[in-house]
Image (spheres, grey):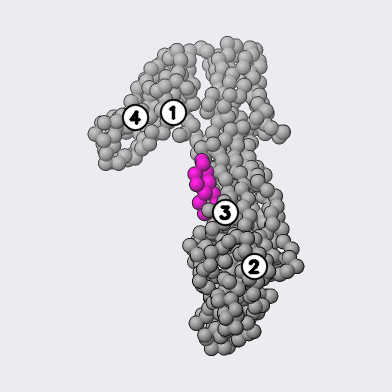
């Protein structure tokens, strides 16, 4: 709704859509003139009618004579009236009516005015700074502000819901007008009102106007449920977002979420601390918001947007991976036009820092740790390939041992495998999700135990559960297709120059590379 209809009495109706009426001023004295502009942009099912006369006014001229406005037309008309008699109060019947669906619905679009006799009036607005760069009539007012008026006679007015105030003064002379902003508006800030006060002159023939601007008080807050977690790939942190302006919620505000803060716009594959982001507003279920596409596709380069609910709140859920480090997430309010808000930047921009702490590797190593997890978790026995994919997506703490991980395949002709890399140096990727480098990485090719090991353990699952896995092979050995102790031939030519290793995708999410799995408990 627009803020031009500044009085409380009905039937003052704002912005009914497709038609508009605005008076140039709202307070008149007998003998003064005022202009008003009608505008319309109608569909084929809508018509309109202009109400050109109102109490206390005499129409002098109009730029366009038509009173009835045909369906499906657009245009405008400006009229001028002379104030001829007192109205005795606010009048709200001057404007136009929108008719919809052959007259089935009628909606008034009026503006307000008052015609005074010899009474003198001081009026004005207390509105917030126009940081949204909207038209002047759309700038929100600050409600319920006492406005103190001192001079030949003194009194106090109070702004209405749209920041408008007025006071009738009985004597001519010079008056000082000073809004008394409440604490919830000023907070701890100084100099938030421009100007602090105004001096106006009231004569027997003319009132006065005193407008004030309040520095925008938008305040975005972001509070994390935890400041630090262990980098075990199973951690979830909720961030509560709120937005308040002048002590009141800001419903529907769009806040840009910037993963890893200073690397805004970077490819998720290059993020120093990989994480997945989910969002919920108004009690809705959490939905994934970033990354939102498979590796190599578009759509993940930009910050994600969070729309606050009707109470000015939303929750961002962060699922952290296995790469340790400091995750900095920036939340930055947008303007209605969609750009980041640079006015009042201190309040419109907040950073949350989450420490994804490295986990020390246990003395018995990865194999023994995996064995214990499988024994205590009672994981059902799976085929080798199914086990590999399940293991790469699991939320069990075997991957807490300072490792980043991903489920991979070698092409052409390679086996399913799990790539393990030091958490501080996760693999790097090409545009088609191929792994271009994995410093310090080792590979467990799950379907390719040696015949000797198969004779002992029957399958990969049994061997893993019994801590009988051979040592993981170096990544480059796996990529080149070379044989190694404990693992049988991979079924492809050694040293194939066209061989590539690909990270597999699950439900369009990155599986590994330090990213948390999509099936994480409490995630989305």
Q: Residue at x 50, y 82 (%)?
A: 413
Sequence-first tag of 2 and 3? 2
Q: Are marks 2 and 3 in contact (CB under 8 Å)?
A: no
Tag 4 secondary structure: strand
Sequence-first tag of 4 and 2? 4
Q: Which mark is residue 23?
A: 1
- From the image, state whether disc 4 or disc 2 is nearer to you: 2
Tag 2 secondary structure: helix
Q: CA distance from mark 4 to mark 1?
A: 18 Å
Q: Are marks 4 and 1 in contact (CB under 8 Å)?
A: no
Viewer can see residue 357: yes
Tag 3 secondary structure: loop
Magenta-span inclusion, residue 250 = no
Q: Residue at x 63, y 75 (%)?
A: 469
Q: Which residue is mark 2?
A: 371
Q: Residue at x 69, y 32 (%)?
A: 187
Sequence-first tag of 4 and 3? 4
Q: Residue at x 32, y 32 (%)?
A: 98
- From the image, state whether disc 1 or disc 2 is nearer to you: 2
Q: CA distance from mark 1 to mark 2?
A: 80 Å
Q: Which residue is mark 4?
A: 107
Q: Are marks 1 and 2 in contact (CB under 8 Å)?
A: no
Q: Which mark is residue 521?
A: 3
Range of residues picked out in magenta: 277-288
Q: Where is 346 relative to 410, above or below?
A: above
Question: How many numbered marks appear?
Answer: 4
- From the image, state whether disc 2 or disc 3 is nearer to you: 2
């Amino acid at each position: 709704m627009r803020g031009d209809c500044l009085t409380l009495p009905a039937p003052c109706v704002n912005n009914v859509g497709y038609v508009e009426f605005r008076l140039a001023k709202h307070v008149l004295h007998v003998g003064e003139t005022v202009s008003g502009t009608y505008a319309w942009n109608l569909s084929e099912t809508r018509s309109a009618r202009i109400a050109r006369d109102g109490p206390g006014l005499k129409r002098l001229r109009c730029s366009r004579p038509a009173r009835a406005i045909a369906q499906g037309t657009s245009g405008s008309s400006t009229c001028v009236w002379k104030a001829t008699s007192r109205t005795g109060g606010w009048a709200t019947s001057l404007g136009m009516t929108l008719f919809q669906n052959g007259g089935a619905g009628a909606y008034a679009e009026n503006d307000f005015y008052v015609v005074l006799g010899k009474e003198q009036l001081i009026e004005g607005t207390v509105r917030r700074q126009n940081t949204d760069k909207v038209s002047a009539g759309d700038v929100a007012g600050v409600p319920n502000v006492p406005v103190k008026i001192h001079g030949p006679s003194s009194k106090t007015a109070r702004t209405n819901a749209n920041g408008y105030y007025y006071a009738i003064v009985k004597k001519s002379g010079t008056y000082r007008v000073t809004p008394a902003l409440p604490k919830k508006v000023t907070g701890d800030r100084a100099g938030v009102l421009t100007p602090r006060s105004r001096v106006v002159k009231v004569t027997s023939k003319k009132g006065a106007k005193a407008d004030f601007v309040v520095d925008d008080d938008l305040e975005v807050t972001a509070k994390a449920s935890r400041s630090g977690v262990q980098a075990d790939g199973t951690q979830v942190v909720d961030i509560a977002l709120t937005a308040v302006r002048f002590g009141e919620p800001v419903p529907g505000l769009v806040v840009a979420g910037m993963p890893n803060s200073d690397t805004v716009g970077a490819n998720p594959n290059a993020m120093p601390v990989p994480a997945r982001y989910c969002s919920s507003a108004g009690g809705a279920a959490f939905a994934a918001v970033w990354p939102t596409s498979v590796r190599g596709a578009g759509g993940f380069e930009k910050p994600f947007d969070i729309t606050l609910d009707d109470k000015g709140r939303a929750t961002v859920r962060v699922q952290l991976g296995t790469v340790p480090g400091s995750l900095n997430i920036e939340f930055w309010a947008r303007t209605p036009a969609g750009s980041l808000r640079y006015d009042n930047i201190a309040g419109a921009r907040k950073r949350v820092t989450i420490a994804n702490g490295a986990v020390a590797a246990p003395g018995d190593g990865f194999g023994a740790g995996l064995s214990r997890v499988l024994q205590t978790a009672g994981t059902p026995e799976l085929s080798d390939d199914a086990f590999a994919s399940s293991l790469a997506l699991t939320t069990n703490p075997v991957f807490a041992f300072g490792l980043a991980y991903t489920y991979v395949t070698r092409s052409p002709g390679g086996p399913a495998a799990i790539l393990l890399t030091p958490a501080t140096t996760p693999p790097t990727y090409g545009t088609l999700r191929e792994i271009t480098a994995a410093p310090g990485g080792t590979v467990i090719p799950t379907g390719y135990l040696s015949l000797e090991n198969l004779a002992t353990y029957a399958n990969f699952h049994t061997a893993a559960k019994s801590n009988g896995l051979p040592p993981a092979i170096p990544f480059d050995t796996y990529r080149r297709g070379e044989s190694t102790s404990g693992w049988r031939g991979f079924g492809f030519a050694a040293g194939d120059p066209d061989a590539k290793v690909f990270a597999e995708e699950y439900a369009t999410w990155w599986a590994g590379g330090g990213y948390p799995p999509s099936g994480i408990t409490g995630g989305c």
